[in-house]
Image: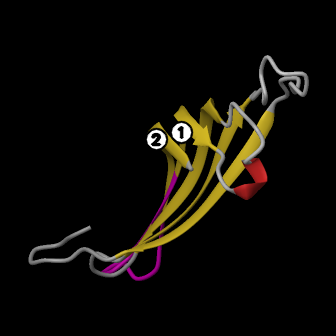
Amino acid sequence: MLSSVRLLARVLTLTDGDRRDPTRWDFLAGVGAGVMSRRGSAWADFTGTTHPAAVLTLETRAHFSGALTFRAGVEDFVSSPTFNEGLPAESLPRIQHDLLVTFALQIPLGRGATR
């Protein structure tokens, strides 16, 4: 499980297409804090599978006709976990990157939905 709180800033905006109905592309970057929790049978014999992480984010948003928006992003959860702490099989902390790639299509519901 990955969860995060991020602060995003628009780095660049490009406009493409017809002047009456342009497509706007926003490029965003961000940083934040997160928590990673490893679960499942592969981690059953390990302790210390939940760790804090720094989160780095790159995202793009394309605003199309009407209120339709396409989003694509990459989040890098950077942590330095130690597994089985205090046990003979304790691992040494090493920097680890867990990448989360997302694609989304936003379609607002309801009257008066605008971009």
Q: Secondary structure at mark 2?
A: strand
- Residue denoted by label 2: 8
Q: Would residue 18 be counted in the magenta stretch?
A: yes
Amino acid at the residue labelled 2: Leu
- Within-10-Å neighbours for mark 1: few <14, some 14–19, many 20+: some
x, y percentage for residue 13?
48, 55
Q: Would residue 92 be counted in the magenta stretch?
A: no
Q: Residue furthest left?
A: 111
Q: Is residue 18 above or below residue 72?
A: below
Q: Residue furthest top?
A: 86
Q: Is residue 112 left or right of residue 50?
A: left
CA distance for labels 2 and 1 = 4 Å
- Residue 30 is tagged as 1
Q: Is residue 70 above or below residue 95?
A: below
x, y percentage for residue 66?
27, 80
Q: Is residue 114 left or right of residue 46?
A: left
Residue drawn at the location 88% of the way across and 23% of the way down: 92
Nearer to the camera, 86 or 110: 86
Amino acid at the residue labelled 1: Gly
Residue drawn at the location 76% of the way across and 41% of the way down: 97
Nearer to the camera, 33 or 51: 51
Quadrant of residue 93 within the rendered picture: top right
Residue drawn at the location 57% of the way across and 64% of the way down: 102
First along the sequence among labels 2 and 1: 2
Quadrant of residue 86 within the rendered picture: top right
x, y percentage for residue 3?
50, 44
Question: What is the span of residues highlighted in magenta in the rendered image?
Answer: 15-27
- Colour mode of the rendering: secondary structure
Q: Are marks 2 and 1 in contact (CB under 8 Å)?
A: yes
x, y percentage for residue 27?
53, 54
